[in-house]
Image: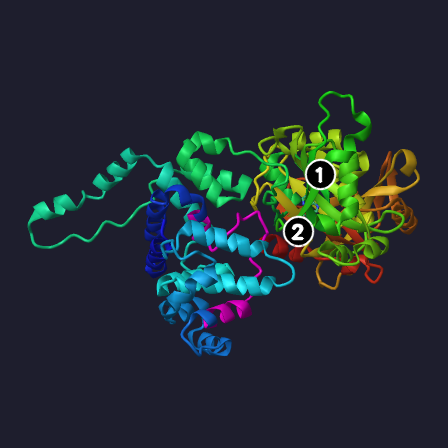
Amino acid sequence: MQFAEFAARASEMEAEPADLATVALVRDLFRESGEELDTVARFVQGRVFPAWDTTTLDIGPRLLREALARAAERNVTADDVEERLAEEGEIGAVAAGYDFGGQRGLAAFGSGGDGDESDDLTVREVDETLRELAAATGAGSEDRKLNTLFGLFNRANPEEAKFLARLVLGEMRIGVGEGAVRDAIAEAFLADEEEEDESEREKGGGRADCEEDGDGESEPEPEPTVRATDEHLAAVERALQVSNDYGMVAVMARELGIEGLGAVRLDVGRPVQAMLAQAGTVTDALDEWGAVAVERKFDGARVQVHVDGGTDEGGANDEDDGDDVSVSVFSRNMDDVTDALPEIAEFAAEHVEAPAILDGEVVAVDDDGSPRPFQEVLRRFRRKHDVDRMREEVELELHAFDCLHADGEDLLDAPVTERHARLVEILPEDAVSDLLVTDDEEEIAAFEADSLDAGHEGIMLKNPDSTYSPGDRGKNWLKRKPDVETVDLAVTGAEWGEGRRANHLGTFLLSARRSGGDGDGSDSEYVTIGKVATGITDEKLAELSELLEPEIASEDGQTVELNPSVVFEVGYEEIQRSPTYSSGYALRFPRFVAVRADKDAADADSLERIERLAESQ
Ligand code: AMP
């Protein structure tokens, strides 16, 4: 395909305000792209390399301005280009404003050609030339880049120059986002012709019908509609999430259809978009899923660890298995951070059976293994220099929480629990995040208290049956929201613990105040609203027992009644109406925060406040 043709189509897209019509333009372009489909599918998004590949052209605005100046009419300087840029606001418009044709005679020098070839740029040639630019490094590479760019612009018409300049800076500005490319791929190669014909008919017929109407009024052109089905779109989306390569997916859709896309596999060494989390509550999670997979939320930096090679087919070389293993570590944005985190790569090479793709968090730790603040990890993360010195200063640990590929098998479609079980098989225990699957709020609260105690950020809640959806901030992973409100409640009962905690009071019964006649709290009545049993360390429990024992009014087996005196500050996720407690309300997911030593029972929250909080949820 001629680059001029591509540029003309890009201009049409830029001028088209409607999304559906833009998709139709992209679809038509894709259908006509022939051999250069993969490149065209990247170029429309301003990409030379696949989305997963973080190679850059490394051409800054200054170099581009210089190249434009050299290719433009005589006497134009880089400063002139900059001035025009200030006026126009955008490099494409500036590039389109120069007449590069005047220098055609020199083009052969700039592009290194022998003068024989046709002077028209092709999409392939632009792609190859830009890739060469990206690879140029070392002494003199700036000059070579400048010369090469000069050569390209020299042969460009204004429209080509506009999009070439934008492509060099990685920004096409033609209103074609990732969603439009996805839709266009589905429409171009998956939506079948029959459906297309049908939807034309549904819209009241094509143009031939209009002419036959003969009423002189020309019908407006039918609005383009999306004809690809949800299934088509989902197939393309999925292949894109797995591969992050729009060019490859477009070609696969064309060559192999929907089944072919379904067969797009993970590739060890090629990063996948990380699955993301929404904020959510334990209450939501339990209501929605029944049981929850709970993990610690590590406060570090996300990594994806790819371990390749080292397969020991004959079983004869057990000793040097680690030697030919190659490990790549990618950041959440799919940047290659392997060199900055040598101990993570070494750990994976030593312990992980290849091939595997792991998802996890890198955490900075103290000598005793407890986590250090997240900022410490950042000091290591993208470092190019002094890696060895920093390695001494900030020790890092991998906490893997997911396994996307193991032993030749893609696990994206396996449930959380199975993926976790695979992790346990391939990694030493210390490096695998604990996973608790439960439907018990108290167990979750205890797990959370334990995580916070150990210095982690909190907990993650995952739908135990859910698959791994790359790039998705869906509802299957929730980071537990911190409590927005707390309530101060009187402790009016408790239970003696068992075993290790036999001498301690625990499971505290909490009550709100229902004020009596004069409202000063003096003749308050206390109505129960919930129990708090977790979030309390053994040490704290001993302290609380000492504080509460003098208030024991009566005992019945394990259960004690307490005179209202001590006030607890308690966090919760939701207040529900409930017949279980005398207030008519129950706290969901209540957690102990602190003793309000500054308050008496008479200062505990009133039932009116509880009612107001329940209503405002
Ligand atoms: P946030 O960065 O606040 O949106 O929280 C989501 C991030 O928490 C993820 O992208 C991970 O980097 C991190 N994280 C820590 N522990 C886990 C875990 N067990 N499962 C998933 N993500 C985790």
On the picture, is 22 further left or further right than 316? Answer: left
The percent position of residue 220, horizontal first and vertical second, equals: 19, 53
In this view of the protein, which residue sits in the foreground, 246 or 293?
A: 246
Amino acid type of disc 2? Lys
- Residue that badge 1 annotates: 326
Q: Is residue 262 visible?
A: yes
Residue sitting at x 48%, y 58%: 112
Determine contact: label 1, label 2, CB under 8 Å. Answer: no
- Residue that badge 2 annotates: 481
The percent position of residue 413, horizontal first and vertical second, equals: 57, 32
Residue sitting at x 50%, y 55%: 130
The percent position of residue 388, horizontal first and vertical second, equals: 82, 54
Quadrant of the rendered image containing residue 430: top right
Q: How many marks?
A: 2
Q: Nearer the viewer, mark 1 or mark 2?
A: 1
The percent position of residue 171, horizontal first and vertical second, equals: 48, 60
Residue sitting at x 6%, y 49%: 214
Magenta part of the chain = 40-69
In this view of the protein, which residue sits in the foreground, 391 or 22?
A: 391
CA separation, marks 1 and 2? Answer: 38 Å
Image height check: is 316 above or below 322?
A: above
Amino acid type of disc 1? Ser
134 magenta-colored: no
Classify mark 2: helix, strand or loop. loop
Is ligand 1 closer than 8 angstroms to the Cβ of mark 1?
no
**Mark 1 or 2, nearer chain start:** 1
In this view of the protein, which residue sits in the foreground, 524 or 221?
A: 221
